[in-house]
Image (cartoon, grey):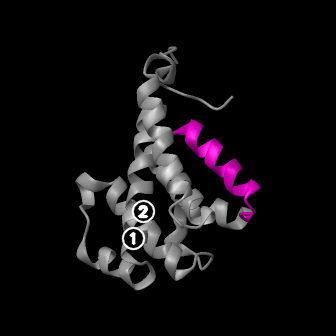
Amino acid sequence: MHERIEWAKHAPQAYKAMIGLEQALANSGLENSLLELVRLRASQINGCAYCVNMHANDARKAGETEARLQTLCAWQETRYFTPRERAALAWLECLTRLPERGAPQPEYEALLEHFEPAEVANLTLAIATINAWNRFGVGFAMVPA
């Protein structure tokens, strides 16, 4: 793989803005375990090795089980995830695969059964943010150390 630029070094304001989004999410009231599942699953879909590695490790440190981490890529096929997590993961998959799926009404309505409106907005921010991080990671060929 060819070496690419260290984007944060060359665009510090962009990096600072991304960190600001993460700070907003840290104060959003959404549980950290849910945020890590969202970050990890989006990173799997987007093929961002750097982010998959980082968020799997962060999830483990936060107490996530190996069974859940190992089956996250097939979450619909397991019973390891709560209805709230399943609604969030379905929404994540729609928005991460936006050109293919759009944001169907049934997935949106499922969110409203498990999340308050502010939580839906913050969850959507989390999805948008990890997708942006993934574009930096994949675009600049970042790999785990």
Is residue 57 left or right of 88 when viewed as pictured? right
Answer whether residue 128 is magenta in the image.
Answer: no
Q: Disc 1 marks which amino acid?
A: Ala
Q: Where does label 1 land, which residue?
A: 118
Q: Which residues are magenta?
A: 48-65
16 is higher (above) or lower (below) than 24: above
Is residue 134 left or right of 49 when viewed as pictured? left
Task: Give the structural element (helix, strand or loop) at label 1.
Answer: helix
131 is higher (above) or lower (below) than 79: above
Identify the image quadrant of the C terminus.
top right
Q: Disc 2 marks which amino acid?
A: Asn
Is residue 117 left or right of 23 when viewed as pictured? left
Determine contact: label 2, label 1, CB under 8 Å: yes
* Residue 44 appears in the picture as rendered: no
Which numbered dot is residue 29?
none
Residue 5 at x, y percent in the picture: 48, 16
Q: Where does label 2 land, which residue?
A: 122
Q: CA distance from mark 2 to mark 1?
A: 6 Å
Task: Give the structural element (helix, strand or loop) at label 2.
Answer: helix
Please tell me which residue is depicted at 59% across the width and 29% down the height of the picture.
Answer: 143
Residue 59 at x, y percent in the picture: 68, 56
* Residue 63 appears in the picture as rendered: yes
Please tell me which residue is depicted at 50% across the width and 14% down the height of the picture.
Answer: 2
The crowd level at tag 1 (other Cα within 10 Å; few <14, some 14-19, many 20+) is few
Q: Main secondary structure of the magenta part?
A: helix
Residue in the foreground of this view, choosing between 133 and 43: 133
Answer whether residue 60 is magenta in the image.
Answer: yes
